[in-house]
Image (tube, helix red, strand yellow):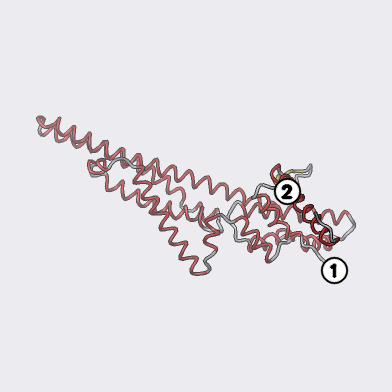
């Protein structure tokens, strides 16, 4: 069975944070426990939109190629 | 020793990262281990099961640890990382020498015009000796604080206050040389009052030149001490936070 190690996410998150695509912040709950959470920055949101657009274009082109269409 | 502390200490030993990045990573992993084990226990897992699953899920291993090190390593450490074993130590030594030369050159630029050195009195030798000694110590401390990949606040703190102490010695030497010179002029003027004005001017030039050099060196050393102290405090704070998270 596929077992996902969440520890592999740390370098990915930290790399994205260094690139300014996400930002991490520490918060503390009532019990004094600290937790780090991440959110998308404006730069990250723009980058995500660009990637999604590129993916959409690729998907359409691929679909056209498979169906034998194309314009 | 708690299980979390044991796991975090193992990760810490394998993370080849400078502070504060190392403690930040440890703190994040500690928070995730704590959260996950608590969540699993709330879902009905036994403490042992919850602990094992949390470790299995969140303990970064092998490639992930190396990748974390790569992401956080400073430019200089990434450069040094290309050289392994003895090669790397050679490069570190070369950088230490460069750092010292830079400090020496920097202090020469910061210190005033060469004629001050030429005009300075007998106290100059003491000022230069103390300055060179203090700069050498500062170079080692700067290496510990900024170049060494695994900083240790206790090692960084060792001998650090000597730099400030030597800055104080500089002030003492400069001012003592200044007033001793005046004392000498007074003595000679008593013997031969006709030349007192000449001696007085000679003292003014020698004494002020020595005092200026000593005070400039003291300011430079105090700044270095301040910089290194701040860095040591930061490293110590992150070490303490990581230890608290592990408990």
Q: Which residue is mark 2?
A: A50
Quarter of the image for the N terminus of chain B: give it: bottom right
Quarter of the image for the C terminus of chain B: give it: bottom right
Can residue B231 be seen?
yes
Q: Please count the marks in the image.
A: 2
- Residue B229 screen position, x and y as percent: 51, 46
The residue nearer to you, when weighing B192 against B59, is: B59
Find numbered disc 1 in the image and state the secondary structure of the residue it sits on.
loop
- Residue B223 screen position, x and y as percent: 44, 42
As drawn, is A61 to the left or to the right of B238? right
Can residue B247 be seen?
no
At x 80%, y 59%, the residue is A62
As drawn, is B23 to the left or to the right of B174? right
Find numbered disc 2 in the image and state the secondary structure of the residue it sits on.
helix
Name the disc covering residue A1, or none.
1
Sequence-wise, the earlier of marks 2 and 1 is 1
Name the disc covering residue B220, or none.
none
At x 35%, y 39%, the residue is B215
- Residue B117 screen position, x and y as percent: 26, 43
Q: Chain of mark 1?
A: A
Q: Residues within 10 Å of mark 1 (few under 14, many from 20)?
A: few
At x 61%, y 59%, the residue is B70
Among the 4 quarters of the image, the one containing residue A58: bottom right
């Amino acid at each position: 069975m596929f077992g996902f190690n969440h520890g592999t996410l740390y370098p990915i998150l930290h790399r994205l944070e260094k690139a300014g695509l996400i930002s991490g912040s520490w918060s503390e709950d009532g019990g004094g426990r600290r937790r780090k959470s991440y959110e998308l920055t404006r730069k990250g949101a723009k980058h995500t939109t660009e990637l999604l657009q590129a993916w959409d274009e690729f998907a359409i082109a691929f679909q056209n190629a498979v169906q034998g269409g194309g314009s | 020793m708690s299980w979390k502390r044991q796991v975090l200490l193992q990760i810490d030993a394998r993370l080849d990262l400078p502070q504060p990045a190392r403690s930040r990573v440890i703190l994040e992993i500690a928070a995730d281990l704590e959260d996950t084990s608590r969540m699993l226990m709330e879902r009905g897992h036994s403490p042992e099961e919850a602990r094992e699953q949390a470790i299995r899920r969140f303990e970064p291993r092998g490639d992930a640890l190396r990748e974390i090190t790569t992401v956080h390593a400073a430019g200089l450490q990434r450069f040094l990382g290309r050289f392994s074993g003895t090669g790397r130590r050679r490069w570190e030594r070369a950088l230490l020498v460069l750092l010292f030369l830079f400090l020496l050159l920097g202090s020469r630029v910061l210190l005033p015009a060469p004629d001050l050195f030429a005009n300075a009195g007998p106290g100059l030798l003491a000022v230069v000796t103390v300055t060179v000694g203090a700069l050498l110590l500062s170079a080692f401390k700067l290496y510990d604080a900024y170049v060494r990949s695994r900083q240790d606040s206790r090692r960084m703190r060792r001998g650090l206050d000597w730099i400030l102490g030597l800055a104080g010695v500089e002030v003492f030497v400069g001012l003592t040389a200044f007033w001793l010179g005046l004392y000498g002029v007074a003595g000679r003027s008593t013997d031969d009052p006709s030349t007192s004005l000449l001696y007085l001017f000679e003292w003014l030039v020698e004494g002020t030149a020595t005092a200026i050099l000593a005070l400039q060196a003291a300011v430079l050393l105090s700044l270095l001490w301040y910089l290194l102290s701040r860095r040591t405090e930061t490293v110590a704070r992150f070490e303490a936070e990581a230890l608290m998270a592990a408990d």
